[in-house]
Image (cartoon, rainbow, N blue to C red):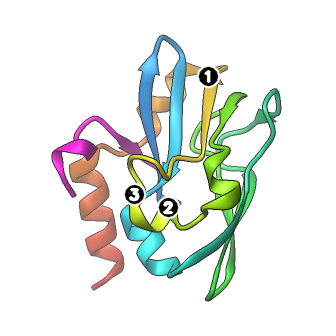
Amino acid sequence: MTNKTANLLYSKEHEWVLSLEENRVRIGISEYAQKQLGDIVFVENPEVDDEITANESMGTIESVKAVSDIFSPVSGVVVRVNEELEDSPALINEQPYEEGWLVEVELSDPGELESLLNEDEYKAFINEGEE
């Protein structure tokens, strides 16, 4: 992980959250998750104006290995979707923290961010799972 990830928060489902501005966040999947999935071939994101709920599925990612749910780390309303992923889902493999983001969300409960892991906690969580 690089200093690009220093400001990110993580869910135990391997999604990351970047605070953009007051009550708005960007969500993606972690580098660890995309490596586990393998080559990503399709992403089904929620639509703009969809309401999403923390810890519930907000879409799917299909890789050459499997189809996996994307669990939202926060609750709120989708305000922007990464349209680039429709034609180039591999951006998630190539740049999971830059061009491979999934959606931007207006938070309904900013307090939910407090339940997410910081980078060090996330690294420890991954390492526990691999022992």
| Residue where numbered disc 2 is placed | 92
Residue placed furthest toward the left: 3
Q: Position of residue 83 (x, y in %)?
A: 67, 44
Residue placed furthest toward the top: 22
SS of the residue under disc 3: loop
The magenta stretch is 1-11
Tally of numbered tags = 3
> Is 88 left or right of 113, judged from the image as shown?
right
> Is 59 left or right of 129, judged from the image as shown?
right
The residue under label 1 is which amino acid type? Leu
Binning the other alpha carbons within 10 Å of mark 1 as few (below 14), some (14 to 19) or many (20 upward) gives many
SS of the residue under disc 2: helix
Residue drawn 42% across and 76% down?
35
Q: Relative to residue 128, is residue 27 depicted above or below?
A: above
Q: Relative to residue 73, is residue 86 depicted above or below?
A: below
Binning the other alpha carbons within 10 Å of mark 2 as few (below 14), some (14 to 19) or many (20 upward) gives many
State how far apart marks 3 and 2 are (Cα). 5 Å
| Residue where numbered disc 1 is placed | 107
| Residue where numbered disc 3 is placed | 95
Q: Position of residue 18 (x, y in %)?
A: 42, 34
Q: Earlier in the sequence, mark 1 or mark 2?
A: 2
